[in-house]
Image: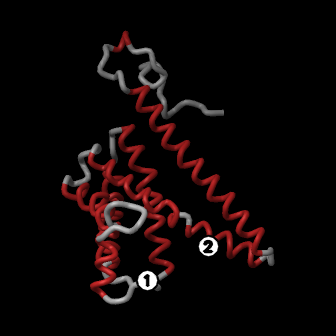
Amino acid sequence: MIPWVVLIQFLNWSSIILVPLTLVFEQVHLGTINFMWAIDMIWCVEIILKFFRATEDVHGFKKTASRYLKSNSMIVVGEFWFDAAATIVPMIFLQTNLRVNVLKLLRLYYLSTMMLPFELLVKFCMETLLYKSNLISAVIGFMKFIISVMLMVHFAACAWISIGKSHDDLPTEDRASWISDPESDFVDMEWY
C-alpha cells in the first residue's frame, strides 16, 4: 500500500510541476506528453481503486464508493469529481489542449497528502538517528513549509514568464521583454 501511495504522490508532484511549464513554454516534447499519458493512466487505476479502498471508519463497497462520490464537510463535491476532471478530461483531449491540462492542477487538493513521501523519509532518517518525536514533528512541519514555498515560487515564476511572453503577437521591434528579445536565448543564459 505505501509504495502505491508514494508513487501516486510522486506523480502528483510531477503533474503539478509540469503543467505550468507546459502552459508557459507551449512547445511540449513528445516525451513530456507520453509521461503525462502515463500519469493519467496510473491515475485511472487509482480512481478505480478508490471505489474499493476502505478506511478506518468506512467499510464495504457501497459505503466506500458513496464516500468517494459524495461530499464531506470540507468541500461541496466528492473527491471523485476532482480526480475525474484532472484525469479523464485531459485524456479526452489527447493531452494536446494545454488549457484543458490546467485541470490537472485540481490535484493540488491532495497537497497535504502529497507531503507523505517526504514525511516518511524524514521520519525514517531521524528515527534512525534516535531523535525525539517532538523534534521530528518540528522538522516535518518546517519541511512542509519549505516545500510549499518552493511550489508557490514555481507557480510565480511560471506566471512571470507567461506575462513576459504575453505580447508575442506584437511586431519584433515593439517587444520590450527580456523573454522575447530576439538577441538573447533564454535557455542558454548564464545564471551565475
Image spot of residue 37 (x, y percent): 30, 61
Disc number lying in front (2 or 1): 1
Image spot of residue 47 (x, y percent): 31, 72
Total numbered badges shown on the rendered structure: 2
Amino acid bearing label 1: Thr
Tell me which corner region of the image, top left, top right, bottom left or bottom right, holds residue 106. bottom left
> Marks 2 and 1, how far apart in space?
20 Å
Local crowd size for mark 1, using a 10 Å CA cut-off: few (<14), some (14–19), many (≥20): few
Dot label at residue 186: none
Residue at 67% over, 69% down: 122
Report helix, strand or loop for mark 2.
helix
| Residue where numbered disc 1 is placed | 55
Comparing 57 with 44, the one in front is 57
Is 71 left, or right, of 148 in this rendering?
Answer: left
Mark before the other along the chain sequence, 2 or 1: 1
Dot label at residue 120: 2
Residue at 30% over, 50% down: 101
Residue at 43% over, 69% down: 8
Q: Is residue 192 above or below residue 148?
A: above
Amino acid bearing label 2: Leu
Report helix, strand or loop for mark 1.
loop
Q: How is the image coloured?
A: secondary structure
Comparing 41 with 114, the one in front is 114
Residue sticking out furthest to the left: 92
Is 111 left, or right, of 102 in this rendering?
Answer: right
Q: Is residue 113 above or below residue 190?
A: below
Is 66 left, or right, of 53 in this rendering?
Answer: left
Comparing 74 with 133, the one in front is 74
